[in-house]
Amino acid sequence: MNRSLRLFIDIASWLLSVAITLVGLAALTFFIGRVLPIDPVLSIVGEKATPEVYQKVYLELGLDKPLWQQFIEYLGKLLRGDFGTSFSTSRPVLTDLVNFFPATLELATIGLVIGVVLGVPMGVASAYWHEKWPDHVLRVIGLVGYSVPIFWLGLVGLFVFYYLLDWVSGPGQLDVFYVGVVDRVTGSILIDSALAGEWEIFANAVSHMILPALLLGYYSLAYISRMTRSVMLDQLSREFVLTARLKGASEFRVVAGHALRNAAIPLVTVIALSYGGLLEGSVLVETIFSWPGIGNYIYSSLFAADMNAVLGGTLLVGIVFVLLNMLSDVLYRVLDPRSRELRR
Amino acid sequence: MSTTEIAADPRHAVRAARWAEFKLFARRFMRNPLGVAGLVIVLLLLFAAAFAPWLATHDPYLPNLTSRLAAPSAEYWFGADELGRDIYSRLIYGSRLTLLIVALVIVTSAPVGLIIGAVSGTVGGWVDAVFMRITDIFLAVPKLLLALAFVAALGPGIVNAALAITLTAWPPYARLARAEALVVRNSDYVNAARLAGASEFRIIVFHVIPMCLSSVIVRMTFDMAGIILTAAGLGFIGLGAQPPLPEWGAMISTGRKFIFDQWWIATIPGAAIFIVSLGFNLLGDALRDLLDPHLRQRK
């Protein structure tokens, strides 16, 4: 088989597996939205609706059709970007999601940067001083991050750093009198306020963001440092590390130049996965900090019994999650020459 | 089919060997202080759940408006909540709910995953392809959100929350069991059993699944911490256990309103969740070091 044909088959089979996973995801949300509730019509029209209204909604939802046909129609709607209408905001769910997503993305991205900047060196140090005191200390820090309920840590953080010490601003994205001052361009408050040259607002946004971002950073740091540690442990025991040392390379060069460089490939996967985890973790953090993102949107829709919005949000985060997973797969293959040769 | 039929008086020998192995295991476990700390925490949790009526100092459900929002004191060790109920007693009773959810999820998700994975790995072919595709889809979906949507559709409650967590918790077991099964499938003793006329069913149940158990147990211990956190998260959002049940996550959610003035209402149940899940994580870490066949061979 020649090379380009094989590449084509690889890409096609990859696309197929992405498509299957996405359809599976849609099947899950379809199942949750249409099959699980005892009566989806009642949840829309309420208990007191007249039979005529009930019948109308019943037909509108297409509930008289067989289930597989309903699912195909559901898929078709999703492909056209129709996630249904949110009952609580009475806007299309997709419009709402586009509105709220940038805030989540901003918070999760900053969280990820914190997690990587602190987590990778922590993992490296932990592996370098394996079974010595730095390793033990760093491992416990990581384990605490694994074990702590993030919403509780958020509450405690607010109590200590906002209420007691007054180092940071409280919940929300901005102080009330700054809200709406800056024109919305990208949806990211930091970028928008910087573009507008409103540095006072920028500073205010930073002081609001710092606590939730640090929390998410800590959350991802636990995972990243743990994975870095195990990958680095593996690399540091390899013979090329010994060779480098025998050749007289400095310890820094051995660790950063030789071991970490090889560890970087699996770490890309780890980081992509933890980004997906952060998007999800932001649901709980956003509810604590009243952050105007997807998580908070889902949370408030839950209480309005607005299933379209809940499922739309779940689907959006799910799609991003799936794509990140797949992207990490691709990156792994592109970056690691061995995985290309070894397949099949 | 076990070694018992080979030796003359084999039962004693087997028992003695098992006992010796257990002693060795226990000794190695005791050398790991963090693991022991985890074990102690888990045992304390079990103790609190078993003896809740004797450990509690107040009725966990009975409102007492005169002690509303009382600060921690000799009477109320951890203070009282917005209805004047003793937080310490509610914590003690809440340990039962935590264990109940964990048990429900583990009892359902581990066997389901184990069976799917073992069948998939042993039978192979299109069965494997279909099962693993489904597993991959579940693995690729955000867990907490899926559980959240699921409970939102089913209606809140402790059993529904456990069901929802199960829905997202089984795939790792399937992956694990499949990987073991692929190794075991073509081993000599399985082939011998096959030659002796054993059915696929018998091979899966008696030869493949037992081989998966030790890695599944390690995975389970780690998972318990995650299950506790997810359950607490669902409780916090209001989709888990419903009032007046003293579920720890739900207790944080009520305490949230009072966080600045009566900090103990929200922080103390959270600390309990944290300590318990840390305990399971420490225990899981230690067990993995001891039981994981891959790490074990290295020593």
Image: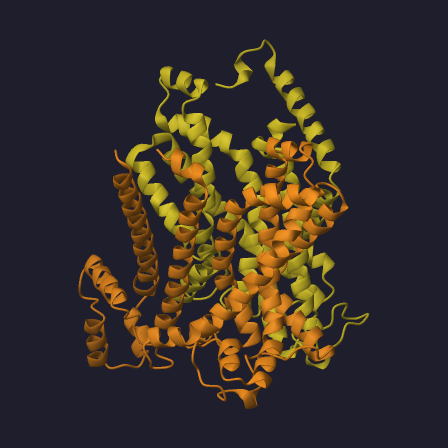
Chain colours: A orange, B yellow
* Rendering coords of residue B241 (x, y %): 53, 64
* Residue placed furthest toward the right: B74
Q: Residue at x 39, y 46 (%)?
A: B135
Query: As displayed, is residue B32 above or below residue A283?
Result: above
* Residue placed furthest toward the top: B8
* Rendering coords of residue B87 (x, y %): 69, 68
Answer yes or no: is residue A282 visible.
Answer: yes
* Residue placed furthest toward the bottom: A177
Q: Is residue A175 left or right of residue A185?
A: right
Give the total of numbered labels. Answer: 0
Say which of A172 and B125 sits in front: A172
Q: Is residue A150 left or right of residue B118?
A: right
* Rendering coords of residue A214 (x, y %): 62, 66
Q: Is residue A267 left or right of residue A248?
A: left
Answer yes or no: is residue B251 visible.
Answer: no
Say which of B126 and A172 sits in front: A172
Query: As displayed, is residue A1 above or below residue A10?
Result: above
Query: As displayed, is residue A187 above or below residue A331?
Result: below
Question: Is the N terminus of chain A in the top left, top right, bottom left or bottom right quadrant?
Answer: top left
Question: Is the C terminus of chain A in the top left, top right, bottom left or bottom right quadrant?
Answer: top left
Q: Residue at x 71, y 28 (%)?
A: B23
Query: As displayed, is residue A205 above or below residue B290?
Result: below
Q: Is residue B44 left or right of residue A52?
A: right
Say which of A139 and B59 sits in front: A139
